[in-house]
Amino acid sequence: MEIDPFIFRLSIFILSIFVGYYVVWSVTPSLHTPLMSVTNAISSVIIVGAIIAALSGSEGVVFSLSSIYGFLAIILAAVNIFGGFLVTQRMLAMYKKKKKDK
Amino acid sequence: MSANLSAILYLVSGVLFILALRGLSSPETSRQGNLFGIIGMLIAVTVTFLSVGNFSSGFIYVLIFLAIGGSIGAFIAYRIPMTAMPELVAGFHSLVGLAAVFVAISAFINPAAFNLGTPGNIKLASLIEMAIGAAVGAITFSGSVIAFLKLQGIMSGAPITFKGQHLLNALLLILIVILTIYLCSTQSSNLFWILIAVSFLIGFLIIIPIGGADMPVVISMLNSYSGWAAAGIGFTLENTALIITGALVGSSGAILSYIMCKGMNRSFFNVILGGFGATEQTSESQNKEQRPVKSGNADDAAFLMKNASSVIIVPGYGMAVAQAQHALREMVDTLKKNDIKVSYAIHPVAGRMPGHMNVLLAEANVPYDEVFELEEINNDFANADVAFVIGANDVTNPVAKTDPQSPIYGMPVLDVEKCKSVLFVKRSLSPGYAGIDNDLFYKENTLMLFADAKKMTEDITKNL
């Protein structure tokens, strides 16, 4: 009997939860704010779905009812991607070690 | 591009996202981690363009909209002050939630574009996934909007409660499940819209009863939701990158909420059901007679610190409100010049989001190896000469260790009272968020400094 591809995706999902669990526990508490902003940025990979939706219009029709939602989602996700990664970078740049005594 | 190749590349971007989080295990590796995240995102977006393979005029519009959103995001990222980080993160969560809702709607209207069947005849599994993605996305959106408004101060941070609130929420949750079941059997678009509307409503209702200082839990929880919403959409689109990311973000947010709840010694449900102290306002705190308090000025504080050999600083949300982190750093610089050892003690729930204080101190150029977590530093208070509490309150209250009647009993607190002397910067004697008196105010060795945190810190620096 063939295995439903859904089962594979479910396996990936479950294993990723465990990976996430162990990886996040190893994050140092002082970086919890950047952790939130970076998870926020990567969850905007939902833009993948938004792009497919935006390009779903039939021949010659750019703006159909379904593609408009895609375009809106692209804007939202793009704000998040750029905003999320850049603000994370800005924060991480501030974390400095003690300067050696001169 | 073949479906297999794109699936593998999506997997690669998923792995890069894992590495991005892994990098955050230490500040040195974190910047590299962020780079991995950016590369992962680039790969995912490029692969999507190539596998859709539609480079007609629609593609140009996609790029235009991408640029619009991107420049808004970049602008915000550069302009936002570090003290506003909790609002920013809440706002960003709402966008992820709304994007998930939009993608789900688009997939519902035009399932053929996603290979999910035809309108009115969508594959059952896809429909369930779509409904979950849309519902969780909608809850994330409206919940985050409320959190944003509360953090921004547009909406009062006080819990809003009414009779039958929990019952109403429970009924709405059941309604969502029923709607999903009916949606699957009828494929009716009306039901889909109602489902989304009810989800918006419940996100709103879940967050309004939660008060300001519980925001760390709320933000982490919404972080988690935005992950689950992405994962739901990932299943609909059969996209590995989204599924992996959704799971990562979902578990990350869940762990953060857990850490925050533990920092307050409260169960998750206790926080979510809201209204801390509102129901358990014990008469005891009101019956207490006015107790004597020692108060001092910047001069006294400077004198105490000058004669100390080690000082521990305990920052809290009040420091963020007063924007006192730079003034604090200047004060510490002066102390260090006098060969006084200074370290910072940070309670897990200090501030309005996980790690809030650490970011502010980093912004003020405080080296991160001078900043310690509760467990690392709590034993040092007994050997320190001065504890300088700036903007923190409940997290220093010794009542949590001594009085089983207190609502915060059992909460891990910083052992500030073990210091030889305590300097407590606060605007007034008013109780903190938990609505209880802080015993620390009345201790023999406590000197209250009634002033704005920033002004007081500057004055002390002048007197040093």
Image (cartoon, helix red, strand yellow):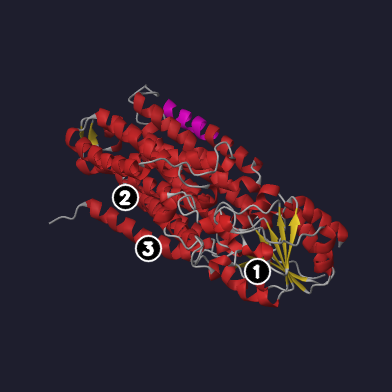
Tell me where residue A64 sits by quadrant: top left
Residue A93 position in % (x across, y down): 65, 55
Residue of label 2: B4
Residue B62 position in % (x across, y down): 46, 32
Q: Comparing marks 3 and 1, which lies closer to the viewer?
A: 1
Q: Looking at the picture, tell me which residue is in the foreground, B7 or A69.
A: A69
Q: Secondary structure at mark 3?
A: helix
Q: Amino acid at mark 3?
A: Phe
User: Along the horizontal axis of the image, is B439 left or right of B446?
Assistant: left
Q: Amino acid at mark 2?
A: Asn
Give the label on residue A18, or none. Answer: 3
Image quarter hosting the N terminus of chain A: bottom left
Q: Please give the range of residues in magenta.
A: B57-67
User: How dense is the environment of label 3, judged by Cα within 10 Å: few (below 14), some, or many (20 and up)?
Assistant: some
Q: Secondary structure at mark 1?
A: helix
Give me the C-alpha separation between circle 3 and circle 2.
25 Å
Q: Amino acid at mark 1?
A: Val
Residue B233 in view, yes or no = yes
User: How dense is the environment of label 2, judged by Cα within 10 Å: few (below 14), some, or many (20 and up)?
Assistant: few
Callout 3 and callout 2 share a chain: no
Q: Chain of mark 1?
A: B
Q: Comparing marks 3 and 2, which lies closer to the viewer?
A: 3
* Relative height, residue B397 to residue B76 (above, below): below
Q: Secondary structure at mark 2?
A: helix
Q: Chain of mark 2?
A: B
Q: Looking at the picture, tell me which residue is in the foreground, B375 or B4.
A: B375
Residue of label 1: B416
